Image (cartoon, grey):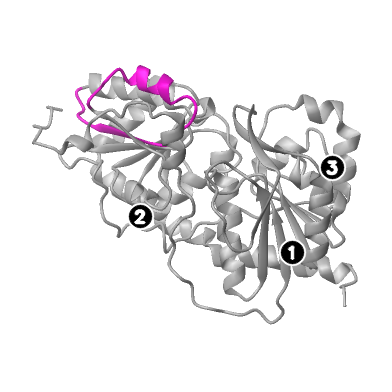
Amino acid sequence: MLPVPRVDRPVAAHLLLTPPSSSAALQRRPALPNLPVLPDAHDERTLRIALVTEYYYPHLGGVCEHVHFFAREARRRGHHVDIITSNIPGAEPQPNVIRLGRSQSVYANGSQARVTVGLGLRRQMRKVLHRGHYDIVHVHSPLSPVLPILAIEEADSPVVGTFHTYFDKSKGYSLFNDFFQKRLDTLAAAICVSHSTTVALERYFSAPWQIIPNGIDTDVFHPSVSAPPAIRKDVPSILFLGRFDPRNGLTTLIDSFRRVKGKRRPAQLVVVGDGPLRQHYYKQAHGDEDITFVGAVLEGRPSYYAHSSIYACPTTKASFGITLLESMACETPIVCSDILGFQDVVVNGREALMTPCGDRDALADALVQLLDDEGMRIQLGTAGRHESMRYSWPRVASQVLDVYHAVMGRVAVRI
């Protein structure tokens, strides 16, 4: 294929951003997504719900998104929902968000994790749960320190847990298996977001797992949104969107992108995300004018998906492909790793082309195949939008609320 002639393009669309200082990065950290107001649809019986999580805005990630969008849908139905989380730098006061202690970033399971530190956390958790008079306490990543375990131990109402993570092995779970199994046994229901999550947990624990997937707001993520200025119009665009964690495979993608260009396929690689490894990836890009680093984006994500030719997700470890769902809802075809967590969401050749994990040549070949075949891109994108509707938040939230009511039917309800 001959190179596509280039036309003048805005400077902002191809500049490699210089690494921001930590203070500058903090100032531009997103706070909360700006979402449309949902119409009220009150359930027959409303509940007081506490969602406990180590991860909430301005942290960006799948657990945070799950908590926020479920809370939004539950509130639309008339339920009272409080989110109990930690104080993260840059967090702003928000209604019905209760913050305890201070969130500390740690590296675990190939990614950036968070734990809460501070004095008197147990007493604070006990006080918050007692004052809230909650019908249900729902902990996310239940066996993770610190807030979820404290909530399990201090709750005086039924506790539901949702597990979000796939992992290969855990020394902590091996060494303290009895401790964690006892906390797991106290849960009134144990939910996993995918089959791959149950595979990881069953290496160490036993429980009657229920699978309820992550959700997607198909009204927010859709193809009819305006284009962001960073995406060029003179060449096809390949999107990376995710935190700058090693397991998300940006190093692999940059190397594969060079192979794509080496095959004389003109394209732009748009990198949406941020993290402590930003300088490493800037150096790897080596000033390539076809690689655009955008930084962290929250509510503008649909526009990047919808106006990219391909979403590339070479992640090496994931429990569920939430970004795959976002791309599917925006009718954007996907090239991703053939890992267990992604197999729960997409089918090779239906919404995505799947390649062996870490195989740079295979990833480059799949990208070239889609760049050369507009018909296949349309076919995969159309199928993705159709499949994404199965994961709409009204459907997912109904499944979670059904679990709540089932649990409360087995436990005496406070009068």
In the image, residue 300 above or below residue 403 = above
Crowding at dot 3, Cα within 10 Å, few <14 / some 14-19 / many 20+, comes out as few
Where's residue 291, x and y in %?
Answer: 28, 28
Q: Which residue lies at the image location 51% right of the left edge and 33% below the top edge? A: 338
Crowding at dot 2, Cα within 10 Å, few <14 / some 14-19 / many 20+, comes out as some
Residue wearing tag 1: 403
The nearer-to-camera label among 3 and 1 is: 1
Q: Quadrant of the C terminus?
A: bottom right
Residue 383 shows in the view: yes
Q: Separation of disc 3 and disc 2 at Cα? A: 39 Å
In the image, residue 230 above or below residue 363 = below
The nearer-to-camera label among 2 and 1 is: 1
Element at badge 2? helix
Q: Separation of disc 3 and disc 1 at Cα? A: 19 Å
**Image disc number at residue 206:** 3
Residue wearing tag 2: 382
The nearer-to-camera label among 3 and 2 is: 3
- Give whichever of 44, 282 is nearer the camera: 282
Residue 208 shows in the view: no
Please identify the quarter of the rendering in which residue 51 is found.
bottom right
